[in-house]
């Protein structure tokens, strides 16, 4: 881990957006993953993705169409469920979702993807997360 990559400098890259939709605990977990992945990926994320979590601050809210188009970013949603897992499992899940974004994968929810493509995307995301040093199981 390079010392240049302080938690504060990562937050600054996102211009505060990282804090906006994440609870404290979730923010801390995302930062911990962002410290471990290649800097080029962090830069990509800081310009193209927002992270949203379930948290006491994010109990309920809505965005209308024009708010949504202003965001103009990919979304990674983190449920509270993953924070009940071990740190390793939680970090693997976050890094796997980051990999989907970085690899420009399409969501099977919004696209008619053949099962084969979905499976391939899952494997590719797992493989990249593993390449970054994350492990599914301890
Ligand atoms: Zn996946």
Image: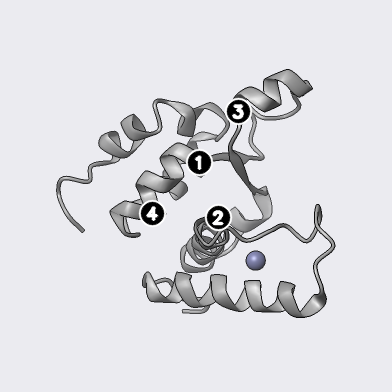
Q: Residue furthest right?
A: 112
State the image coordinates of residue 85 (x, y, percent, origin top left).
Answer: 58, 63
Quote the CA–CA distance across marks 2 and 1.
9 Å
Which structural element holds mark 3? Answer: helix
Quote the CA–CA distance across marks 1 and 4.
10 Å
Which structural element holds mark 4? Answer: helix
Q: Which mark is residue 48?
A: 1
Q: Is residue 4 above or below residue 70?
A: below
Q: Which residue is mark 3?
A: 71
Count neighbours of disc 2 (C-alpha within 10 A) and say few if under 14, some if 14 to 19, many if 20 or more. Answer: many
Q: Which mark is residue 41?
A: 4
Instruction: Tell me the residue at 72%/57% (across/down).
Output: 107
Quote the CA–CA distance across marks 2 and 3.
15 Å
State the image coordinates of residue 38 (x, y, percent, origin top left).
Answer: 31, 59
Tell whether label 3 touches label 4 (CB within 8 Å).
Answer: no
Tell whether label 1 touches label 2 (CB within 8 Å).
Answer: yes
Q: Quadrant of ligand 1?
A: bottom right
State the image coordinates of residue 65 (x, y, percent, origin top left).
Answer: 77, 23
Q: Which residue is mark 2?
A: 101
């Amino acid at each position: 881990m390079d010392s240049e990559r302080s938690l504060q400098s990562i937050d600054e890259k996102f211009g505060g957006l990282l804090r906006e939709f994440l609870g404290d605990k979730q923010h801390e977990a995302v930062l911990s993953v962002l410290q471990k992945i290649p800097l080029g990926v962090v830069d990509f994320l800081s310009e193209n993705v927002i992270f949203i979590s379930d948290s006491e601050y994010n109990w309920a809210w809505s965005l209308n169409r024009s708010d949504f188009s202003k965001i103009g970013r990919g979304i990674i949603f983190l449920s509270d469920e993953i924070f009940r897992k071990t740190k390793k499992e939680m970090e693997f899940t976050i890094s796997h979702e980051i990999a989907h974004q970085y690899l420009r994968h399409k969501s099977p929810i919004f696209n008619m993807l053949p099962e084969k493509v979905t499976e391939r995307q899952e494997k590719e995301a797992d493989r990249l997360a593993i390449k970054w040093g994350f492990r599914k199981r301890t």
